[in-house]
């Protein structure tokens, strides 16, 4: 089985999955897809070709490689090893490539369950939000056996421009959670700095221009300063999902006994914004919680 001949399935056509799968279709793969909300799968196939499967098990039966991109560990478990899951239809040498961001412990448990049925698993979470998913320029960090990585790598390279094998199953998730917690800490600091700049009478466009080109420049300044300033929370990456990732990162930090105090602060800010009803909005909405603390609005 190699990439040019392998049959590819895709489960989860949300903000990220729909765009990642579209790149695979553009690269010539006729995908078998499944999405919980079937209308989204039908609309995707109408645009990109391929086949809508009735269940994750049917995706497994029709595929040599099954990619999943859902939200959390419970969902990955459901679509891969639950009732009607991939495991029920997959041939014994099928490879599951889970690209969702979930707890590394969940990945290892699901991988062990799949292995009992002879099905292999790779974790390959991604960083870069929907514009990079659309452009096929995600950063992808994978964990699993070297031969499984080698099999999946050509597909991963269609979706990402930096693809790194970082260790055994679950290690991709560990690194992904650290990445997102660092990003959340940075976005929180950008919001706090912005509130201070505003209170001190500095024009926020000047704030953004200077930070973007100076020593505080970051992807968070580039992507989130403007939405925070404009209170535009059109979701690229939902706040609830970022909160999930920071919480999972703190669990990992606790498990290995490593401090990450600033991530604890970011978790509180995100939780406060979720509590104000912004969970389904972009995580730039963390500014709403910071404005609450500051008692002033940008
Ligand atoms: P999303 O737009 O909310 O899409 C979630 C997908 O999961 C949809 O296909 C949804 O199906 C499906 N789903 C939800 N609940 C389900 C269930 N109970 N059973 C089966 N499927 C279910 O999320 P997203 O932004 O694409 O994120 C997907 C993953 O990528 C998450 O783990 C996230 O942390 C990670 N991620 C996101 C970004 C980003 O910038 N957005 C970046 C890097 C990584 P329906 O269509 O039926 O709702």
Image (tube, rainbow, N blue to C red):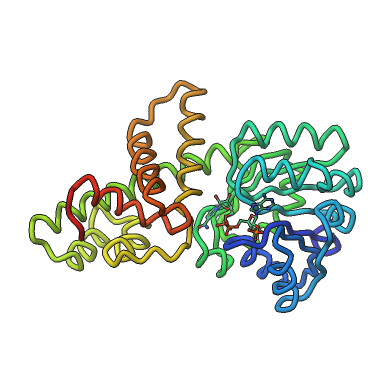
* Residue 263 percent location from the top left of the image: 37, 37
Count of picture labels: 0
Residue farthest along the bottom direction in this orientation: 47
Foreground residue among 22 and 53: 53
Q: 225 above or below 178?
A: below
The answer to whether 167 appears left or right of 90 in the picture is left
Judged from this view, the residue extending furthest toward the top is 257
Name above or below for residue 127 compared with residue 37: above
- Quadrant into which the C terminus falls: bottom left
**Left or right relative to 67: residue 187:** left
Tell me which image quadrant ligand 1 sits in.
bottom right
Taking the spot 59% from the left edge, 66% from the top edge, the residue there is: 136
Farthest-out residue, left: 201
Q: Please give left or right for residue 246 compared with residue 72 in the image.
A: left
Residue at 71% in and 69% down:
39
Name the image quarter holding the N terminus.
bottom right
Q: Quadrant of residue 219?
A: bottom left
Coordinates of residue 262 in the picture (x, y in percent): 33, 35
Q: Where is residue 277 shown, x and y percent of the image? A: 41, 52
**x and y percentages locating residue 175 in the rendered image:** 52, 40
Q: Residue at x 80, y 70 (%)?
A: 30
Q: Is residue 258 above or below residue 159?
A: above
Residue pictured at 30% horizontal, 53% vertical: 288
């Amino acid at each position: 089985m190699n990439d040019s001949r392998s049959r590819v399935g895709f489960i989860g056509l949300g903000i990220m999955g729909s765009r990642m799968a579209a790149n695979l279709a553009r690269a010539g793969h006729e995908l078998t897809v499944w999405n919980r909300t079937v209308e989204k799968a039908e609309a995707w196939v109408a645009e990109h070709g391929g086949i809508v499967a009735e269940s994750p098990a049917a995706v497994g039966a029709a595929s040599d490689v099954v990619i999943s991109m859902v939200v959390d560990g419970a969902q990955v478990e459901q679509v891969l090893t639950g009732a009607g899951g991939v495991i029920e239809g997959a041939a014994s040498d099928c490879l599951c490539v889970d690209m969702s961001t979930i707890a590394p412990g969940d990945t290892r448990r699901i991988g062990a369950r799949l292995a009992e049925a002879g099905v292999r698993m790779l974790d390959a979470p991604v960083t870069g939000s929907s514009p990079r998913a659309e452009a096929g320029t995600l950063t992808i960090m994978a964990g699993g056996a070297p031969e499984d990585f080698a099999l999946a790598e050509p597909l991963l390279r269609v979706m990402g421009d930096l693809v790194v094998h970082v260790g055994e199953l679950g290690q991709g998730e560990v690194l992904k959670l650290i990445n997102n917690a660092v990003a959340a800490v940075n976005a929180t600091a950008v919001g706090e700095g912005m509130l201070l700049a505003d209170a001190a009478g500095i024009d926020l466009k000047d704030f953004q221009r200077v930070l973007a080109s100076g020593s505080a420049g970051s992807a968070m300044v580039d992507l989130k300063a403007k939405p925070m300033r404009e209170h535009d929370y059109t979701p690229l990456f939902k706040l609830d999902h970022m909160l999930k990732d920071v919480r999972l990162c703190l669990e990992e930090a606790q498990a290995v006994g490593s401090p990450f105090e600033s991530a604890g602060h970011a978790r509180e800010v995100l939780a406060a914004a979720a509590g104000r009803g912004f969970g389904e909005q972009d995580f730039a909405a963390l500014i709403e919680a910071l404005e609450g603390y500051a008692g002033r609005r940008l």
